[in-house]
């Protein structure tokens, strides 16, 4: 009986009627002599003595609730005069706004998707790191100027706890725990102590790639990167590798793609060179392999690292990096995408 009463209470709270006839039908169903509530009152004599008090109270509550609801509905009709059609229940409801994926997520997923098609799997590592995984294992000597190049956020004045400045740190973790062959990408957020402007932010996103096996060569690296560039920016995209320096790769290079805005003819975006830089790469330095417990006489490997914001800018021409973290819906709504 208690269940039935509670069920009716619930139903009553949601009752609605669009006109007087419906209201009268509700009243008869609930409160007339043969109505549901009267039937419950009749059954009350069968309730066990020790429950009578509680059930009696509930029953009265139910009756009052029904009466109140009927009165309330009645009043709403009389207030609105002749407007039986005050609420058009056949009208469709306001559509619920669906969110959109963040442009950085769209592009990150696209990068992951492209590399997963050639056998790369994914791993992630911590954003709060130690010096060894961000610098030490990656062949940055203690006083190496490259450590200054990347202005680092240290935590609580402890130089051993820091926010990672690049996702290359995941390389050191994966190599130390897994045996080759390793063919993985590491997407994630990184932090640098930069003044925030339209072209720099104190946090941004990277995807790092790593392939370690026997006989991995620079030609393999070039082929994988060319495949990536064409998948990401279209089949006509050209790539060019310029010699560079990173402590963790030897030889090192930076990769440019033909500017996908002007098709290589030269525009403001590519500073009239026809090329835009999109990533750093190289052959993993033997010191790094050894630091992570991999025999550099047996294994070689390549690595690369790219900025997700940079790739997103190239795809969508977002001119101000700050837009990515301001969460302005007018900006985000432009990225409705099936991805
Ligand atoms: N970690 C570099 C950076 O943040 C990017 C990079 C360059 C990653 C070369 C690599 C690499 O794996 O081989 O600027």
Image (cartoon, helix red, strand yellow):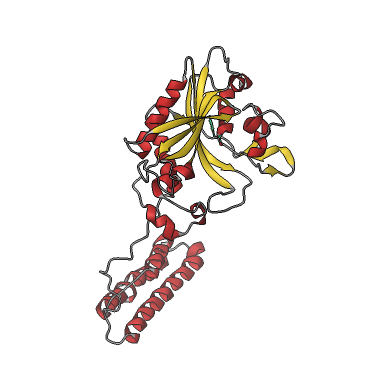
The picture places residue 67, in percent across and down from the top left corner, at 39, 78
The x and y percentages for residue 317 are: 41, 50
- Tell how many labels: 0
- Front-lying residue, 185 or 68: 185
In the rendering, at what x and y percent does residue 263 appear?
A: 35, 42
Q: Nearer the viewer, residue 84 or 127?
A: 127
The image quarter containing residue 75 is bottom left
Q: Is residue 85 above or below residue 178?
A: below
User: Splitting the image into 4 quarters, where does residue 87 fall?
Assistant: bottom left
Taking the spot 47% from the left edge, 42% from the top edge, the residue there is 308
The image quadrant where one finds the N terminus is: bottom left
Compared with 218, 277 (above or below) is below
**At x 53% / y 27%, what residue is drawn?**
252
Q: Is residue 135 above or below residue 331?
A: above
Residue at the outermost top position: 297
The quadrant of the picture showing ligand 1 is top right
- 147 to 183, vertically: above or below: below
What residue occupies the far right of the structure in this picture?
A: 157
Using residue 258 as the reference point, say whether residue 310 is left or right of it: right
Residue in front for this viewpoint, 24 or 91 = 91
Is 227 on the left or on the right of 88, as rendered?
Answer: right
Residue at screen point 53% across, 35% down: 124
Percent of width and height locating residue 40: 37, 68
Left or right of 180? Residue 157 is right
Q: Is there any visible trace of residue 116 in the rendered image? A: no
The C terminus, quarter of image: top left
Could one spot residue 294 in this view of the protein? yes
- 133 on left or right of 50: right
Residue drawn at (43%, 22%), measured in percent from left and top? 220
């Amino acid at each position: 009986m208690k269940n039935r009463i509670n069920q009716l209470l619930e139903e009553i709270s949601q009752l609605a009627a669009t006109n007087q006839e419906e209201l009268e039908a509700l009243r008869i169903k609930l409160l007339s002599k043969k109505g549901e509530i009267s039937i419950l009152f009749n059954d009350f004599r069968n309730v066990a003595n020790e429950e009578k008090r509680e059930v009696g109270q509930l029953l009265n509550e139910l009756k009052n609730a029904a009466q109140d609801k009927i009165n309330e509905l009645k009043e709403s009709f009389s207030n609105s005069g002749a407007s039986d059609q005050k609420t058009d229940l056949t009208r469709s409801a306001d559509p619920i706004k669906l969110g959109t994926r963040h442009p950085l997520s769209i592009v990150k997923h696209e990068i992951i998707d492209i590399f997963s098609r050639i056998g790369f799997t994914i791993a992630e590592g911590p954003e709060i790191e130690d010096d060894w995984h961000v610098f030490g294992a990656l062949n940055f000597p203690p006083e190496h100027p490259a450590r200054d190049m990347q202005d680092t956020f240290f935590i609580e004045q402890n130089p051993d706890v820091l926010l990672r400045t690049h996702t290359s740190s995941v390389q050191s973790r994966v190599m130390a725990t897994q045996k080759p062959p390793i063919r993985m990408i590491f997407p994630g957020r990184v932090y640098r102590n930069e003044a925030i402007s339209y072209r720099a932010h104190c946090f941004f996103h990277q995807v790092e790639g790593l392939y370690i096996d026997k006989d991995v060569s620079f030609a393999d690296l070039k082929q994988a990167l060319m495949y990536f560039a064409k998948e990401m920016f279209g089949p006509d995209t050209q790539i060019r590798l310029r010699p560079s320096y990173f402590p963790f790769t030897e030889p090192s290079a930076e990769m440019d793609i033909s500017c996908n805005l002007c098709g290589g003819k030269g525009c403001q975006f590519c500073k009239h060179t026809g090329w835009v830089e999109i990533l750093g790469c190289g052959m993993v330095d033997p010191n790094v392999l050894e630091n992570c417990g991999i025999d550099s006489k047996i294994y070689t490997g390549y690595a690369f690292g790219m900025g997700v914001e940079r790739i997103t800018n190239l795809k969508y021409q977002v001119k101000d990096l700050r837009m990515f973290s301001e969460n302005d819906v007018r900006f985000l709504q432009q990225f409705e995408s099936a991805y």
